């Protein structure tokens, strides 16, 4: 398994894995599938401190993680929002942990003092990984978003670097 910074030619694989997360309804409130135009713009916003990394196995991208801007306000410049997505066929195999270790190292190198993330309370696999890696539950936002016509809760978690 090789963990490395993403390059533009990885975007199709990153998009496909992201779209799996949207379809599976376990990782995001997003409901609209992403296209290449969206992904190019998204990738353009991940320069400098905001990184995207991929997990590559035998030439195939099997997961990715990103540090995202938490807020445009300068008071929050030390906080990064986290995304982690693993392809369906590779979930539960330790890839998320490898990505977290690598993205946290990049967060520290880029002067972030805290990482926050938002997950569904029913995403036990994700929460297990985050807790194992030292993230703590901050709280649950009740009825935070709508997914498939139903209000869903969203759990906030954080880790001080």
Image: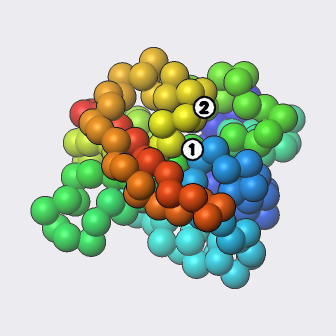
Direction from residue 153 to residue 157 in the image, left or right? left
* Residue that badge 2 annotates: 96
Q: Quadrant of the C terminus?
A: top left
In this view, the residue farthest toward the bottom is: 37
128 to 47, vertically: above or below = above
Image quadrant of residue 131? top left
The residue depicted at 50 percent of the width and 57 percent of the height is 151
98 to 23, vertically: above or below = above
Q: Position of residue 92 (x, y in %)?
A: 70, 24
Determine whether label 2 and label 1 are within 8 Å by CB: yes
95 to 23, vertically: above or below = above
48 to 44, vertically: above or below = above
Residue 14 visible in the shown view: no
Image quadrant of residue 113? top left
- Which class describes the residues within 10 Å of circle 1: few (<14), some (14-19), or many (20+)? many
Residue 27 visible in the shown view: yes
- In the image, 131 versus 78, the foreground residue is 131
Q: CA distance from mark 2 to mark 1?
A: 7 Å
* Residue that badge 1 annotates: 84
Labelled disc at residue 136: none
Q: Position of residue 23 (x, y in %)?
A: 75, 55
The residue depicted at 57 percent of the width and 44 percent of the height is 84
Image quadrant of residue 11? bottom right
Q: Quadrant of the N terminus?
A: top right
Direction from residue 135 to residue 2 in the image, left or right? right
Q: Secondary structure at mark 1?
A: strand
Q: Position of residue 91 (x, y in %)?
A: 73, 31
């Amino acid at each position: 398994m090789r963990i490395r910074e993403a390059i533009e030619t990885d975007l199709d694989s990153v998009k496909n894995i992201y779209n799996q997360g949207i379809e599976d309804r376990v990782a995001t409130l997003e409901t609209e599938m992403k296209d290449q135009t969206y992904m190019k713009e998204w990738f353009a916003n991940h320069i400098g401190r905001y990184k995207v990394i991929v997990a590559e196995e035998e030439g195939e991208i099997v997961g990715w993680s990103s540090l995202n801007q938490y807020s445009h306000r300068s008071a929050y410049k030390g906080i990064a929002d986290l995304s982690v997505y693993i392809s369906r066929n590779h979930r539960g195999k330790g890839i998320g942990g490898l990505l977290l270790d690598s993205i946290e190292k990049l967060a520290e190198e880029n002067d972030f003092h805290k990482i926050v993330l938002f997950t569904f309370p029913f995403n036990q696999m994700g929460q297990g990984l985050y807790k194992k890696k030292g993230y703590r539950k901050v709280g649950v936002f009740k009825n935070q978003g709508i997914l498939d016509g139903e209000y869903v809760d969203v759990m906030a978690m954080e880790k001080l670097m």
